[in-house]
Image (spheres, rainbow, N blue to C red):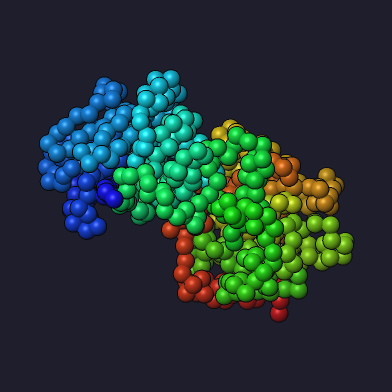
Amino acid sequence: MEKSKVLITSIPVGSYKDVEEKLKKLNKKPGPFDAILVLGEKDLDVQDIDTIELSPLYFFASNDKTDLNSKESSGDVTFLNNYGMYQLSNGLKITYLMLTGKELIEQKASIVKYFSTIDKPVDIFISFEWSVAIAKNKGRILGNEVVDDVVKLLQPKYHFSNGDKSSYLEYNPFKWDNTDVITRFLNIAEYKSKEKWAYAVNIDLNLSQFDQEIPENLIQNPFTAENTKENKGENSNVVEYSKRFNDDELITERKIKKQKTVLPTNCHFCFTNPNVEDHMFISIGNHSYLTIAKGPLSVPKGEMDFSGHCLIVPIEHIPKLNNGQDSDTIKNLNEEITRYEKSVADMNYTKYDMSTVTFEIHSSKSVHYHEQILPVPKYLIMKFQTALDRQVYLNNEKFQNNAKLSFQEYKQTDNEYLEIIDNVESNFFRFKIYETNEAEPRIFIAMFKSEERIDLQFGRRVLSFLLKLPKRMKWDSLICQQTKDQEIQEVKKFQKGYKSFDIVN
Ligand SMILES: [Zn+2]
């Protein structure tokens, strides 16, 4: 079977010279490549490129209004602008759509018309923007519906984007109805982002490659999932599936069926799970425990030589605090959680001069309730409301399928607040702000209905915006990952600072 080896890279303006040697090396191994595809920018440094010895190299400019559908050659470099199709001599078919935002919408009719004439199979599709279907599933604000239309038309084997320059992402493969084609979507981070900026792929030029076994991690097709009622129901299981810290990863079709209920034996927070990561535990109480966070958002700051990002988790496998248990159980659990919360806020304030924010989701669709706690520098805590408003605006305006959020501020003793948390039917997002160790916390609540789709990363989104740590938004991004040893060190440092505040003594 004939295969074609291709390298896809994302290189910012002005950096081409820095990268050239690296590309040459890559072209030796894992190359040589039939093509090196460079996702670039407007205003490429053409002079730089004139000097390259690599061949063949294709540049995709994000757009260039003067050159509609142009293919312009400069030595061994071919520039591909706007949108079109390019076929290598070995038959590899590359399609591209480099327009953005408004241009896409304005030219939608001609774009769709153009791509509907292209014969399948299509090996590679490159777009600057993401499809809405995938952006939404990943909780991103990126995405343009015209890209969705084109992906559905082309059903490419690979869809590459550099719309998110700061993070690398590999989306699980999915299959199209009525064909054997499996599509993989990858977002290539930009060179200098510290994430993966070059991706080598060996593409089988025959479609029959898909006679081979179906990948283990095959997921429901995000482009067709929205179209049927039944699938809409399954989508809501995204909410139910919590891989340790409510990550937004999608579920394989098999998992959707199997993991409708996550049992304590395979729940990431349950002691009965033999794989529970108990090296992360800081303190264990009677009804709940305190653990460091996987992929912490915050970073060591000032006197605090650990991230300070921790979680309070009930020992019992319950989706939310008020899950219809008897009132004593709820009372005891709530009391202990509040004590843990205050003890951490106390440590943050008295020992490290930091304020504290907690956030959590109360939903009957959660797997195992947990509350996140983060230290926030005092000079930033004043900006909490602004950060919250900003993210609410984005949630409500950009994610059309998300539940619309509206936060109300309460004091702990407000009757309305007590009614909300006492009602077993309530589903809500909650933030608590401990500006100091003594003042009562400010509480912000936004209610939603259990059947509504919610952004599981909303709390982390607000905090990453507030803390000005956008690159650490995703807990599973490379930058946030810690080794087991690093986690053990985190726990040791946390325990050292927390010792005199620990509620368990
Ligand atoms: Zn559990």
In which image quadrant can residue 492 be found? bottom right
Question: Is residue 385 among what the camera can see?
Answer: no
Question: Is residue 490 among what the camera can see?
Answer: yes
Compared across the picture, whether 157 is left or right of 366 comes to left
Compared across the picture, whether 145 is left or right of 419 comes to left
Q: Is residue 424 above or below residue 281?
A: above
Instruction: State the residue at coordinates (80%, 51%).
Output: 421
In which image quadrant can residue 51 be found? top left
Which residue is outermost to the right? 327
The front one of 48 and 233 is 233
The spot of residue 131 in percent (x, y) is 47, 36
Q: Is residue 503 above or below residue 246?
A: below
The spot of residue 1 in percent (x, y) is 29, 50
Q: Quadrant of the C terminus?
A: bottom right
The front one of 357 and 74 is 74
Instruction: State the residue at coordinates (26%, 21%).
Output: 66
Instruction: State the residue at coordinates (49%, 57%).
Output: 216
